[in-house]
Image: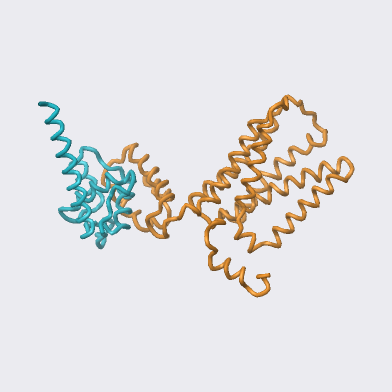
Chain colours: A cyan, B orange
Amino acid sequence: MTTPTSELGRFAEPSLYILVSLSDGPKHGYAIMTDVEEMTGAPLGPGTLYGALARLERRGLIEALPPDDRRRPYRITGLGATTLSAQLAHLEGFVRTGLTRLGGAAR
Amino acid sequence: MKALVRLYPRAWRDRYEAEVIDLLDQRRPSFRDALDLVVGAVDAHVHPQVGSAVIPWTRRLPGLAVLAAGATWIAATVAVDPSGSSSLSGTFLGLSLLAMTVGLPGDYAIRRGRAILAVVGLIAAGVVVAQIAPYPVAVVIAVATVVLFLAGALALAAVRAEIGSTARWALVVGMTIVPALALIPFALGLLAIDPLDLTIRWLLLPYGAAWIVLGLRLVVRGSQSIVDPPTGVETALVTAPGRSA
């Protein structure tokens, strides 16, 4: 069973960014923050980042790896990857519908 | 900026504090980051994800009752109509006393039933004596009875909010006995008061503010409510031999 990130309220969007960021390998908090900023153009605040990380970890979508000094890397879990895949597929369908309608309106 | 991390709950800090401090060390935090940390701290208290289980909404009911008691008390103070043509203040006062009573902890009544019964008995005796005693003793007894009720209710709310005994005594004395002592000369007619000048009523505001502070603390921390199933302690007390009758 997958846990949709949409149930995370205002943390849904940051959680999606974090899952995408972790989909190519483990990262610690600062690396996730800079990666998300590169992807979206807007940084995640520290409170939002760790609020989302705590929720994702509690739901088993990511897991913490042993810390390296004060930095603790996070890794996406199998459940997290499945959830992300379903979420992106849903978004892809939404984007395709939107572009199709825009194209139809332009003709 | 790092001091803001102290606003987070203990369990959250044990888990994430070192990481967040490290993150703050690696970038120059902005005002928006500071605001984000404060909002995150409130969220971590209201929706804890680390350590203890998420607090069910029913455990926030006592705090909401205490908050309502404080808000309606302040509303009653503000709504006083010197001309006496509006009963709004009295309505708010009634609602406040109701919320104070509803907010009192049923589980605490089980543990300290005799002490609470003794205070209720004193209040009842005070009401009777104030009716039959000669002036000015009746006035002093009446004020003392009201203060005993207000102090007792506030003390119970403070106990429920897990305020330490020293701070609890300071709170109760500062918010009830001190304003009452200031009111006694007026109640006895020793100091004149203009019926249209009710600035003296602002002495009552800190009491309502104290209930709001306790209510916020209770809402954040959660507490046993009358709709929660009894915990092991209460179950043991209720079913203990000699107490079940």
In the rendered structure, the answer to whether residue A72 lies left or right of residue B154 reads: left
Q: Quadrant of residue A25?
A: bottom left
In the rendered structure, the answer to whether residue B65 lies left or right of residue B55 reads: right
State how many labels appear.
Answer: 0
Q: Residue at x 67, y 40 (%)?
A: B94
Q: Position of residue A103 (x, y in %)?
A: 12, 31
Image height of B193 relative to B51, above or below: above
Q: Position of residue B1 (x, y in %)?
A: 37, 43
Q: Residue at x 33, y 55 (%)?
A: B18
In the rendered structure, the answer to whether residue B16 lies left or right of residue B140 reads: left
Q: Position of residue B2 (x, y in %)?
A: 37, 47
Which residue reaches farthest right? B134
Task: Work out which quarter of the rendered image holds the C terminus of chain A and state it.
Answer: top left
The one nearer the camera, B234 or B145, is B234
Which residue reaches farthest bottom? B241
Q: Is residue B57 visible?
A: yes
Q: Position of residue B214 (x, y in %)?
A: 56, 48
In the rendered structure, the answer to whether residue A79 lies left or right of residue B150 reads: left
Image height of B45 relative to B241, above or below: above
Q: Is residue B24 visible?
A: no
The one nearer the camera, B131 or B28, is B131
Task: Work out which quarter of the rendered image holds the N terminus of chain A and state it.
Answer: bottom left
